[in-house]
């Protein structure tokens, strides 16, 4: 994966000159951000991406049953293909106010960095390859995938990898922010929905009757006291608690969502075992039914820093003057990495406050981010 050879290619130099002006990419990112795409409800954004890729004259255009969008730039059939993917969904409900706000060098908007800018990068990578007729050797698949966030459990990229796996040599996952960041280690994640059901009743007349909420919060309190190692880094979080009917009703039903993560499969398994023991002890409480459902299972995986794909990404970032930050994370790259397919997740520009209403990007590095991405794609498809 010779980055310098591609950097000196005359057609790549012309493409670099085009990408130096980041405004067209930013315009696309802003247009994508204005289309609501909560997890499980991405159809409108899927249609936008399909139309943009179709206009480029790519082959094998398709939208699968989940809403993943596929397009291919053909290469030699004997060469492994490259998959470039960006997730379409956001954490924000459809009713979220998506108005943009400009303040100095920042542009604020829910979902703008995560992942409207990544989606724009996907579209413009395809566009610049087509416009300058750049010579990829293996085919490049472009996929806008659904269900990366929250309870989507990576089902979009799971379906895409299953569909294309026999063709693939490696995978690039695009996120809008963290320019210069390279994720080549995927942390494992397990998510539980824990539900309690009890007889309930009137807070006065039935006082003493088991309460689903009381039972749940006792268990939740025990969970918060769990001890996890700092090295290897392991975390847990109770993200949502819900239930009950009114202030003067003994609750019949309550539930909570628990997120558990670790860079180590062994440490994650130990944490899950601790949780399972607490749940088993709580389940013997008289008068209360307890149910646990696994609602998320993101497998771990990694490739080494000296892997050719990692080294090509590092060289591409360096070629555009970026320093490289190695990170461990849970992204769409979890799926190919867990299956032994080389994959990295990379960022295209700077930003912050992801998953918040005041999420923002700093678009100044967006041109360099696309230049680096172009080099990565050409080297990885060679």
Image (cartoon, rainbow, N blue to C red):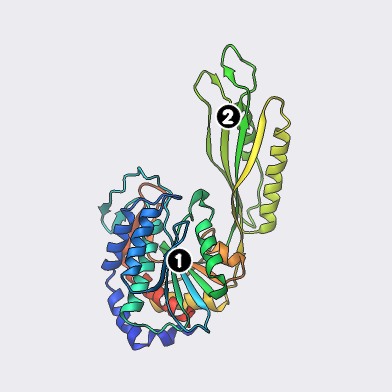
Q: Residues within 10 Å of mark 2 (few under 14, many from 20)?
A: many
Residue 203 screen position, x and y as percent = 56, 16
Apparent side of residue 74 relative to residue 194 in the rendered image (left or right): left
Indicate the secondary structure of the residue bearing disc 1.
Answer: strand
Q: Residues within 10 Å of mark 1 (few under 14, many from 20)?
A: many
Which label is found at residue 4?
none
The foreground one among 211 and 352 is 211
For marks 2 and 1 on the same chain, the one whose residue lies earlier in the sequence: 1
Does any portion of residue 184 appear in the rendered image? no
Residue tagged 2: 253
Identify the residue at image location x=33%, y=76%: 128
Q: Would you say the residues marked 2 and 1 are in contact, meaning their CB atoms lie under 8 Å apart?
A: no
Apparent side of residue 121 relative to residue 284 in the rendered image (left or right): left
The foreground one among 140 and 207 is 140
Residue 351 screen position, x and y as percent = 38, 58
Q: Name above or below for residue 256 compared with residue 245.
A: below
Does any portion of residue 229 appear in the rendered image? yes
Which label is found at residue 85?
1
Identify the residue at image location x=50%, y=82%: 77
Residue 194 screen position, x and y as percent = 61, 38
Apparent side of residue 106 relative to residue 224 in the rendered image (left or right): left
In space, the residues marked 2 and 1 are separated at their CA atoms by 40 Å
Indicate the secondary structure of the residue bearing disc 2.
Answer: strand
Q: How many marks?
A: 2
Identify the residue at image location x=57%, y=12%: 204
Residue 85 screen position, x and y as percent = 45, 66
């Amino acid at each position: 994966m010779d980055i310098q050879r591609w950097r000196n290619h005359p057609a790549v130099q012309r493409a670099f000159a085009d990408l130096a002006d980041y405004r067209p990419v930013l315009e696309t990112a802003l247009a994508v951000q204005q289309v609501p795409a909560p997890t499980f409800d991405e159809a409108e954004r899927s249609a936008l991406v399909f139309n943009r890729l179709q206009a480029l004259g790519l082959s094998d255009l398709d939208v699968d049953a989940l809403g993943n969008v596929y397009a291919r730039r053909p290469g030699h059939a004997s060469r492994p293909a490259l998959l470039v993917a960006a997730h379409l969904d956001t954490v924000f409900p459809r009713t979220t106010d998506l108005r943009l706000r400009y303040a100095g060098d920042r542009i604020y908007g829910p979902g703008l960095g995560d992942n409207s800018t990544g989606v724009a990068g996907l579209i413009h990578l395809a566009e610049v390859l087509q416009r300058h007729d750049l010579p990829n050797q293996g085919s490049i698949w472009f996929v806008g995938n659904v269900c990366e966030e929250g309870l989507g459990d990576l089902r979009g990229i799971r379906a895409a990898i299953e569909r294309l796996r026999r063709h693939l040599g490696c995978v690039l996952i695009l996120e809008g922010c963290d320019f210069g960041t390279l994720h080549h280690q995927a942390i494992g994640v397990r998510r539980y929905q824990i539900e309690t059901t009890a007889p309930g009743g009137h807070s006065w007349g039935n006082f003493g009757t088991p309460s689903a909420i009381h039972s749940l919060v006792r268990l939740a309190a025990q969970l918060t006291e769990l001890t996890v190692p700092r090295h290897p880094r392991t975390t847990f979080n109770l993200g949502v608690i819900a239930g009950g009917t009114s202030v003067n009703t003994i609750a019949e039903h309550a539930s909570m969502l628990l997120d558990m993560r670790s860079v180590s499969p062994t440490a994650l398994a130990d944490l899950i075992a601790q949780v399972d023991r607490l749940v088993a002890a709580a389940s013997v409480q008289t008068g209360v039914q307890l149910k646990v459902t696994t609602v998320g299972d993101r497998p771990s995986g990694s490739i080494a820093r000296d892997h050719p794909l990692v080294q090509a990404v590092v060289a591409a970032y360096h070629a555009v003057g970026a320093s490289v930050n190695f990170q461990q994370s849970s992204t769409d790259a979890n799926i190919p990495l867990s299956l032994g397919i080389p994959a990295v997740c990379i960022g295209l520009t700077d930003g912050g406050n992801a998953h918040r209403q005041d999420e923002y990007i700093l678009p100044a590095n967006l041109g360099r981010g696309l230049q680096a991405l172009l080099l990565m794609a050409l080297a990885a498809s060679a």
